[in-house]
Amino acid sequence: MIKVCKFGGSSVATAEQFKKVKGIVKSDPERRFVVVSAAGKRTPTDNKITDLLLLVNAHIEYHVDCTSLLASIEERFLDLARELGLTFPVAEYFAEFANNIKSYSPQYIVSRGEWFTGQLMAEYLGLPFVDAKDVVVFHHDGTVDMQRTQTRLREAVVQTGGSFLLPGFYGATVDGQLKLFQRGGGDITGAILARCLNVDLYENWTDVSGFLSADPRIVDHPRAIHRITFDEMRELSYMGASVLQEEAIFPVREVNIPIQIKNTNAPDDPGTIIREGAREHAMEHLITGIAGKKDFVAIHVQKAHMSNEVGTVRRALSVLEHYNVSVEHIPTGVDSFAVVVNGDDVKDTIYSIITDIKKEIHPDAITLVDKLALISVVGRNMSRRAGTSGRIFGALGEAGINIRMITQSSQEISIILGVNNSDFERAIRVIYQSFGDDVVVSENANRVQK
Ligand code: ASP
């Protein structure tokens, strides 16, 4: 087995965290490739190095002196080197960086968070440092040139003797122009490395023990999710339960390399395994997780004989497209439909949108329902079992919670409910309690038993 381990900003924020990382990497010889983020917050009120570097860029842009800001960034790296007894010449490299700061691109400046953190961690772990600018190759449009990246990463494996540290979050075009992934993009670097080297497992080390089946601020001690499929994870993250930078799943998903979310501060916790299918376990939970978001808006449109007309919904949707508003759901009736959108996306334009829809399709009535919360009940095992939605609706009905909208995702792995914002937390608790720890026997496990 070969593993890629990616450590996020909180896992490399202090000397104490560096020691935990070393303990984790050294305890398993299969952990041969390490990716790091830039040092993150040491305390809840502290700043991430990446945020400070973005601030450096803003200072430069507005011609404000950033000497003391740069000094505070350098201090963090100097502290780490001192506390861990490292010989990497932070002061020397940082002086060069600070003295030439105006000559660098904004991307280069931000990437130094990962670069310095990576240099320190590489020395501390005794691993060769491979610079991401030499191996993660970007096209000019900001997408990754996977073919070149794979070739270069494989060369790096040979050159380093089969184990190295790679800073996350950045890479470069073939002509050396530095490029960044989106925020949180160290996860993407880890996934690309895992894929290009075709490893067996991508471990993503963070500060939580994986996905929880509900938001712990709403449900008391929700069950941890041990196994989840990529689709389920997409549904839950989209609705707010985010642990991993979402783009990170695509490179590994295509080749079905599992991702394991692990907690640097509690390395023995099992964490969450994300993979296609979940074959080998006999007992599985009926509901994998519940997540949701508030503040959606539903535009209800009524038009007699609409069902006999062609193109009405399309024309209404083209109005939203014109305003660049993405559509979440479109529940339809015979002579009516609704378009559910994110409240934030239409806060300045909703009345112009309604006026334009009126002009476009001449409806009999348009009504607006705002302060709508959407709750997604996610579970790969729901689709094969009758009665799940009945139980959800029954529980909500008994609790006196009015359901304003119902839809189901196309692969039937989630049931999405609209409730009033004011019922949101209670609805999640009611659904969670009504399913609690319900388990089902997986079909594949049955087959094995027979
Ligand atoms: N350091 C970058 C950020 O803060 C990338 C990462 O942490 O993955 O967004």
Image (tube, rainbow, N blue to C red):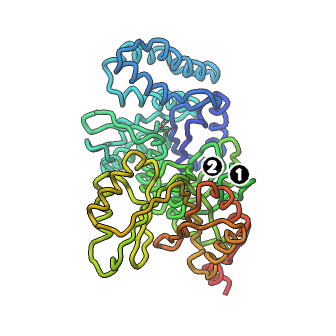
Give how far across and how far down residue 10 sits, in percent. 60, 36
SS label for mark 1: loop
Which one is in front, 224 or 339?
339
- Can residue 2 be seen? no
- Residue behind mark 1: 269
Label 1 CB less than 8 angstroms from ligand 1: no
Residue at 69% in and 63% down: 432
SS label for mark 2: strand
Which one is in front, 419 or 18?
419
Q: State which quarter of the image contains the C terminus.
A: bottom right
Looking at the image, is 281 positioned above or below residue 63? below
Mark 1–mark 2 CB contact (< 8 Å): yes
Q: Amino acid at mark 2?
A: Lys
Which one is in front, 200 or 187?
187
- Can residue 313 be seen? yes
Looking at the image, is 20 positioned above or below residue 99? below
Q: Local crowd at mark 1 within 10 Å, few (<14), some, or many (≥20)?
A: some
Give how far across and how far down residue 208 sits, in percent. 65, 46
Q: Is residue 415 left or right of residue 160?
A: right
Outermost residue, front direction?
A: 364
Which one is in front, 344 or 236?
344
Give how far across and how far down residue 321 sits, in percent. 30, 56
Q: Amino acid at mark 1?
A: Asp
Q: Is residue 361 left or right of residue 197?
A: left
- Residue behind mark 2: 262
Looking at the image, is 380 positioned above or below residue 169? below
Number of numbered markers: 2
- The residues bearing labels 1 and 2 have C-alpha atoms spaced at a distance of 7 Å
Residue at 63% in and 49% down: 262
Q: Earlier in the sequence, mark 1 or mark 2?
A: 2
